Amino acid sequence: MQIGTLIKRAKTYLPNLKEEKLREAYAYARESHKGQTRMDGTPYVMHPLASAIILTELHVDEDTLIACLLHDVPEDTDRTLGDIENKFGKKVAFLVDGVTKLSKVKYRHDMMERQIESLKKFFLHSARDLRVILIKLADRLHNMSTLEHVREEKQLRIARETMEIYVPISDLLGIWEFKSTLEDLCFRYIYPKEYSDLKKQMSRSAHHHKKLLNETVQMVARSLKQHSIKAEVEARPKTLYSIFRKMVSRGQRLEDLNDLLALRIIIEEQAKCYQVLGIIHALFRPRSGRIKDFIAVPKANGYQSLHTTVFGVEGVPTEFQIRTHEMHFEAQYGIAAHYFYKQARQRGKQSQTAHQKTQSAWVQKVLELQKELKNNYDFLENLKIDIFQDRIFVFTPHGDVIDLPNGANGIDFAYHIHSDIGNRAVGMYRNGMKTPLSTMLNTGDTVRILTSKAQKYPRRDWLEKIQTSLARNKIMESLKKQTAAKRHHEGSEFLKRELFRYGFGDSNKLPERQKQKLIKKFEASSWGEFLEMVGEGTVSEEGFIQALYSLEQLLGKPYRSRKTPLSDVKFQKKRHTRLLEKTSDVTQDNPYYRVKISLIATDRVGFLRDIGIQLASIGANIYQIRVSDHIAKEGQVHVVITLEVMDFAQLRRAFDAIEAVEGMLEVYRMREKKTAKS
Ligand code: MN
């Protein structure tokens, strides 16, 4: 790898590139990193060079390439940001600054503070200038591709961090090419066994697939030529991780997946896309219901293409994507495509016709945010809400960042550190205050998990509280390791507790008819086995509650015709809200339910306030709150809350939220006496 390679690649799209400046930056980086080597023994400067070469795929501009070559200089060498500014100017220095962590010396007493501040700085710089994120992504991409040389425990940590922070960022920015490459690289380290199994399986059918694809490409190319359509026809390899994800989400084996063969046809004019579709359908019989027109109706993120699946060569299902060069570049490089094309156009180097169409809504949103944030000091808050809404960043006492989905709590956090810590967790200190494990965490929190040697297994009800699939898998794994008797006991206790919670009384008095219903529904051989299934988590709370009771029994009669902002509804229903849904301000009628909940807790200052905060955080409205005179014991308080919820899922979360309030002793739903209604 040499500087010549970088210059050659950059010149393909930057005809006026100042070659000397790039060479100068490279020489400066090489000189600065002199004597340093990467884990694989190569000179350090190979890393920024490789990252810059990766960036040429995005057609980034000259400043970005220079900044990328210099990106590790201030952090890892004697030369400072000031040196870079003097030599390469303010703009380049700003980009380098964005990816540079804050001084180790200044923060030597508080490494956690350094992490937070560095993260904030990265976000701030990215918000002002998107190119900062692109440099960081290229940097990460190269580090991931050389991860085999790194110590094993570090490999897993870096791969996870990548999967949890940088993959979502690439996804958000629509940079598919980076996203899929990063995912495959992470896959290898996070699920090594699954990765190698799948790879082996794939290689078995590789030869046959290749033959089929070649034949298809030839047939299609011939036919397009007959119609005088200039096109690129290419086989589109499916990434291992995308196949793995499909197998998991559909519960299918590799043999059962029928969309392994995929091709892409790229042409000049949009109008001809439909003609090509016709030509494909004349060659192969289309599968009904598998034709999608994302040109007329683009996806929310702006993606455009025609999709069709046909019975291809030998009758094997084959997927085609038909698009123009423009659509293709945009599909692969998302926001970068907009950003740099726009710039090129302004400089008059790009034809006016190219990329004239309106930017998709989400791109506009990101660009707007960039503008707004220039004068906004609440940057982190804004970014969190508008861009990284579904992620939070939480710190270990050592200052490591654990990235979690929004709504995650101490249990999720514990399992993200280690499954042993999860299984033995009994409580946590959040920012120095002792709080229940199920308390929701926020960005910037520092969390220390308290563990107990006596506790070997997770609690059954954790399964209903966590947000991450990682915690779910680990808890299920551990619960299954318990003896049958223990699982039976746990299941029985859990059932009892849940029925009490929703106001259905004692599970021991559950009628035989109801028990049979559950046994049948969950295909258990006996009541005992059903309880075991509950105890090990195979049967969820939502599962058995909804099998036993109708919506009306659970929530009462719905109230209607209140205007609720759609954005709120979506936020309540789905944790992984997408950018577009959040920006919508459409309102619509939604039924909602009033549920009366009784709670008993240790009396203390701020108790009601904490309940209010918890309930607001899940978007549930308090219709009425009443402090009852009935007190069972001295120092306790009895409160009755009438809550407005959208659905059962929200009611469940309301219970979790209330139970997480410090000092809570008992929470259950109060049921109206039937006679009282008339
Ligand atoms: Mn680097």
Image (tube, rainbow, N blue to C red):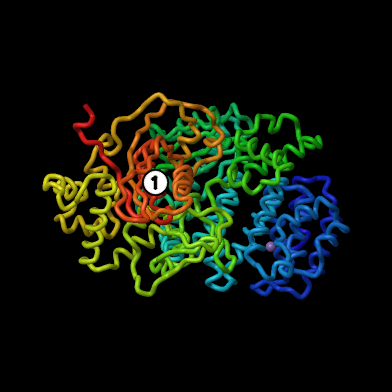
Res 363 quadrant in image: top right
Relative to the observer, which residue lies in front, 170 or 420?
A: 420
Q: In which of the image's four quarters is ligand 1 placed?
A: bottom right
> Mark 1 sits on what residue?
653
Relative to the observer, which residue lies in front, 470 or 503?
A: 503
CB of mark 1 near ligand 1 (< 8 Å)? no
Relative to the observer, which residue lies in front, 516 or 215?
A: 516
Residue at image x 39%, y 46%? 653
Please provide percent x and percent y for residue 265: 56, 39
In the picture shown, does residue 469 fall above or below 419? Answer: above
Residue at image x 67%, y 55%? 136
Please provide percent x and percent y for residue 527: 15, 55
Label 1: state its secondary structure.
Answer: helix
The number of callouts visible is: 1
Q: Which residue lies furthest to the top in this view?
A: 561
Residue at image x 34%, y 65%? 478
Please provide percent x and percent y for residue 543: 28, 47
> Could you tell me if residue 315 is visible in this image?
no
In the picture shown, does residue 357 fall above or below 137? Answer: above
Res 364 quadrant in image: top right
The quarter of the rendered structure image containing the C terminus is top left
Identity, as a three-letter code, of the amino acid under mark 1? Arg
Q: Label 1 neighbourhood size at 10 Å, few (<14), some (14-19), many (20+)?
A: many
Left or right of 34 on screen, residue 273? left
The quarter of the rendered structure image containing the N terminus is bottom right
Please provide percent x and percent y for residue 52: 72, 56
In the picture shown, does residue 624 fall above or below 144? Answer: above
In the picture shown, does residue 384 fall above or below 351? Answer: below
